[in-house]
Every structure is written in C-alpha cells, then in structure tokens.
Image: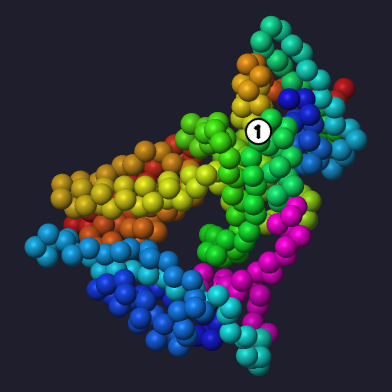
Amino acid sequence: MKSLVEYVARSLVDSPNEVSVREVRRGSAVNVILRVAKSDMGRVIGKNGRVANALRVLLKVAAARQGLRATLDVEEPR
Amino acid sequence: MSETRTSLEIIAPTVAEAIQQGLEQLGVHSSQVSIDVLDEGSRGLFGIGARQARVRLTLLTPPPQPPSPLKAEPSTERVSLEEVPPTIQDPTYLRKAEQIVYRLLREMRIRAQVRAFYADQPGPSGEYPIQIDIRGRDLTVLIGPHAETLNALQYLVNLILGKQTGRPIPVIVDVEGYRTRRENQLRRLARKMAEQAIKTGRRQVLEPMPANERRIVHLELRNFQGVTTESIGEEPHRKVTIIPKS
C-alpha cells in the first residue's frame, strides 16, 4: 500500500526525491502518511482534494484486498 | 469547408437507408468509414412515437487537406467537432499508458490483462482519446460503487500520463466493457424519461451523474422531438433535467 502511494506521488510531483511515505498500523487500520516538497503539495492534493481523494479510493481497494482499512494523510514537510 | 469534414450524421427512416445516403454524400465505400448507429429508430405504435434512424459515419482515413491560401487563419479559432482533424496518434503513448495501468494494478494486487488503443470517436475536446481495456476475472472491485474506483483510476492515469508526456492526453479506462454497457443503459434511460416527460408534461430529474454520463444523456436527446435538457445543481450532485417543450 505504501508503494502504491509512493508510485502515484512520485509520478505526479516535480521533486520525486522529496517524496516519503510511512505507514502507521493499528490492528486492521493502516494510516498512510505521504510527505512531499512544499511546492508539490498542490499536485498531490489537487483542486478540492481531487487527486488525494482518487488516491484514497485506490488505496482503500488495495487495503481491502488484504483485509485492512486504510486512510491517507498528506503532510507538509517541516 | 466540406473537404476537412471527417464525419457525418444522417437521419433517415431506417438504418440501412441512413448509411446508404451517408456513403453517397461522402462518395466513399463502406469499408472506408466507421459506422455508429446513434439511434435505430422505431416505427412506434400505430405511428405514434415513430422515430427516424440516426447514424454517424466517420472517415477512417480523412482525405488530405488541400493547401489553402487562407491557411493564415488564427489557430485559436474554435472549430466544430466535425472539422477537428485526428490528432497524431503516437504508439509510444499507448505503451506508456499501458505501463501506468499495469503498475497501478500491480500495486493494488490485481491481476488483469491491459490493452491500449486509440478510440475511434473523438472525445469532448475533439481529440481522439486513448482507450484502455482491462480484462480479467473478479474485476468488479475495480469498478466500485457508481464506478468510483474506475473513475479514480482513470483520473490518476490521465494525470500521470500527462506528467510523463508533458501534454494532456485524454485516457478512457474501461473494465470488462463496463462503460459501453453503461452508455447503452443511459441512452435507454434518457429516451424512456424523455417519453415520460412528454406524456406527463412534467420535467424529469435524473439521478446525479458525473459529467461524462450527463454528456451521454444530453447528446442522446439533442434531436429528440419535444424535450430539451439541462444540468442543474453543483458537482458532484449535478443532475440532468429533461424538460418537455410547451
């Protein structure tokens, strides 16, 4: 699941080297946290969150196939 | 500008007559065009509700445009759908699009066959979209409720391919012929509701639909006698309304 988010994010941003993804798992719930360069935030979120929401839909399907529930957060770099 | 026209819509009492007329007008053989039956027409009951057949003929290889001294027309001028020449169909884009879909499916742990080709119909932009067919077993999860998953996949493939090639290339992703079936279903629904609107004299409001599905309904009823259509509401709850003409 991490690699799905990584692949999509790296394919969309201008600075793929600054993409990092981590997974926090609690039971059957997985929180995937995506971090990209500040200038790339708009590309992975999209207008009205459209890109992030599409990615959430695919992530949900991928997770369900492993009996998991996944959520996606997009974080700004510190 | 009839030289640049690559497709033609004909209305005639029957499908066969419409095709015949179209071929005569274009002056070509039936092997040189692709034929879409837009409406099979119907005799109606006792002549009530009879509709003519409607077909579209699209030249497979459009005739070369004769060099024109008026070539200096502003390129920003909008041209009608029929006059847009097919865009250059680069096979490397097909391979790229296939690879993106394969990769996404692999990441989702879905096994399927993927095939990309250029659609034979131009999309809303007048450009010929890349069509990607995904086939395999148990792929309903790839469609999702209200095609949510399929549309998310299609949206991301469009973005990724656009980023890779540096230009927006429309991509349609389909799973096991879902979009074609849905299109036929929407057309039938559109006609049924239009007839209902006429019969009752009341506007019929359809379920909320995404833009591509609303477009199918509008197009289907464009030449339907006695009704007009419009979309109301805000995305993602926009609905087509079918209004009887008074």
Residue B172 position (above or below residue A63): below
Tag 1: Cα neighbours inside 10 Å, few (<14), some, or many (≥20)?
many
Depicted B68 relative to depicted A17: above or below: below
Along the line of sight, which residue is nearer the eye, B244 or A27?
Answer: A27
* Lateral position of residue B55 relative to residue B65, left or right: left
Residue B142: percent from left, percent from top: 57, 35
Relative side of A47 to B233, left or right? right
Q: Nearer the viewer, residue B143 or B135?
A: B135
Q: Quadrant of residue A68?
A: top right
Q: Residue at x 74, y 55 (%)?
A: B95
Residue in the picture at 21% in, 52% down: B195
- Specify the subunit that label 1 lies on: B
B150 shown above or below B30: above
Whole-percent x, y for residue B154 in the image: 61, 44
Q: Residue at x 20, y 48 (%)?
A: B196
Q: Amino acid at mark 1?
A: Ile
Whether residue A10 sits left or right of residue B30 in the image: it is right
> Which residue is labeled 1 in the image?
B110
What range is drawn magenta here?
B72-96
Which residue is most to the right?
A17
**In the rendering, at what x and y percent does residue A9 appear?**
78, 35
Q: Secondary structure at mark 1?
A: loop
Q: Residue furthest top?
A: A27
What secondary structure predominates along the stretch shown in magenta?
Answer: loop
Residue found farthest to the bottom: B69
